[in-house]
Image (cartoon, grey):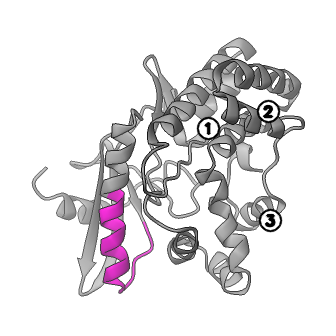
Amino acid sequence: MTDLSGAVREALRARGEPVSRLGYFCVPFRPAEGVLKDKVIKTYRGGRDPEVLEQLARRHTAYVDLLTWAGVRLPETRFLILNEAGYMQPVIVQDALDEAILMRPQIEAADLPDALALLEGAAASIADFWGRVAQRPERIGYHPSIRNFAYDAEGPIFFDTFPPLIGYSREDMGKLLLRFSESGLVRGVGTVMPGRIRAIQDEWYSPAGTIVGLFGSAVRLRPEDGPAILDWARGFAAAHLDADLGVEVLAELDRPPRLPAFWTGMRRVLGLEGKPNV
């Protein structure tokens, strides 16, 4: 595609229906027609801070490269910045995935053995990612929630590359969470209680936290199967995770994992949908 920026501008003028309302940062949409009709477009809060945005672009490229290097399957994902008279807006253009392979509805619809098989494949891929990046010098994170995965015959596909969780300190990532939140309420809360917003990221940078988070989402999606899922999760952690990681995960599975009360309340106030998150 020779003029991606032009195609994105055209798609934005004729914006289609959103494919999800789950996002903290954006509402992705898929064009109904045109050269990008097989893509999902994600637009993020723009501004006139080129140093922040140009660094973001570099880090996004580095993060996609890292994920690919670490064996994470991704749809083709491109990042660009639209510049309108100095107002710069970040955009991600990503190959659209068949809705039939999105992991969340598969977990909801499957019988319990098939749901556990999906969880096992996803959890194993998360553990593998952390093992591969363990010796990297950068601060690296990962946000592999059920709603950020698809799952086909070859295994999990991850499709959430924003924010790029590479190279940012905890303090700087906290600022990024505020800078790119679409919600004025979140930005307002962040000026008063920055620590609360900063803490949103902590699970993303914790190997045990990301795995426990996956299991917790499954329990919230299928509360009637919660005890069976937790029993299975304990067995998975004991049998398939290395000793230190397994101990950390098991310590978090003595009760059903819960989202932080602040974040649960914030999602309700913002009207962000999604059974795993309510």
Q: Nearer the viewer, mark 3 or mark 2?
A: 2
Say what secondary structure mark 3 lies in. Answer: helix
Residue 197 locus on image (x, y percent):
67, 71
Label 1 – label 3 distance at C-alpha: 20 Å
The residue at 25%/77% (across/down) is: 83
The residue at 57%/32% (across/down) is: 127
Furthest-top residue in this view: 113
What residue is pinned by disc 2?
250
Q: Is residue 70 left or right of residue 36?
A: right
Say what secondary structure mark 1 lies in. Answer: helix
* Residues packed near mark 3 inside 10 Å, few (<14), some (14 to 19) or many (20 plus): few
Kind of residue indicated by mark 1: Ile
Say if residue 70 shows up in the picture. Answer: yes
The span picked out in magenta is 44-60
Frontmost residue, 200 versus 42: 200
Residue 80 locus on image (x, y percent):
27, 63
The answer to the question of whether label 1 and label 3 lie on touching residues, with beta carbons closer than 8 A, is: no
- Residue 58 within the segment the image draws in magenta: yes
What residue is pinned by disc 3?
262
Quadrant of residue 208 within the rendered picture = top right
Vertical position of residue 28 compared to residue 198: above or below: above
Earlier residue among tags 3 and 2: 2
What residue is pinned by disc 1?
146
Say what secondary structure mark 2 lies in. Answer: helix
Earlier residue among tags 1 and 3: 1
Label 2 – label 1 distance at C-alpha: 20 Å
Kind of residue indicated by mark 2: Leu
The residue at 56%/42% (across/down) is: 144
Quadrant of residue 54 within the rendered picture = bottom left
Kind of residue indicated by mark 3: Phe
